[in-house]
Amino acid sequence: MRLRFSHGVTVDEIATTYVIHRVTAWRWLQGAQEALWGNVITQLKLAIPNDEIGLNSLMQLGESQIAGNRNALARQWC
């Protein structure tokens, strides 16, 4: 993900660098993004008191607000 988001390397360039098919490179990036998002969710659950209503509300708000900004988050954390 660091190559993609911090350095602006395309999926095709990643595939060429690692001598893999571009679909494999895309899958790697998707898997890394899903893992990162899973980490964010886990950390939020740990940081927020165990209040299901509050957590669910925050998760819905976060999903709507952050969904379009996952790439920006990934750039900051890579």
Image (tube, helix red, strand yellow):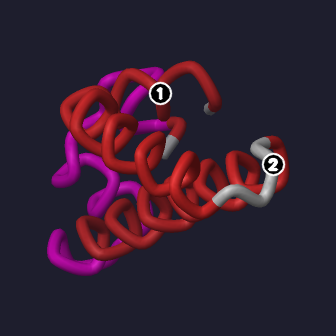
- 14 relative position to 75: left or right: left
Q: Position of residue 13 (x, y in %)?
A: 25, 47
Residue under the image location 39 percent in, 37 percent down: 62
Q: Amino acid at mark 1?
A: Leu
Q: Position of residue 26 (x, y in %)?
A: 24, 66
23 within the magenta span: yes
Q: Which residue is mark 1?
A: 73
Quarter placement of the C terminus: top right
Q: Main secondary structure of the magenta part?
A: helix
Q: Which residue is mark 2?
A: 49
Figure disc tally? 2
Q: Which residues fall within the magenta stretch?
A: 3-24
Is disc 2 surrounded by few (<14), some (14 to 19) or many (20+) residues within 10 Å? few
Q: Amino acid at mark 2?
A: Pro
Foreground residue among 74 and 29: 74
On residue 21, the disc is: none
Q: Using the rendered view, name the quadrant where residue 69 is placed.
A: top left
47 within the magenta span: no
Residue under the image location 57 percent in, 52 percent down: 55
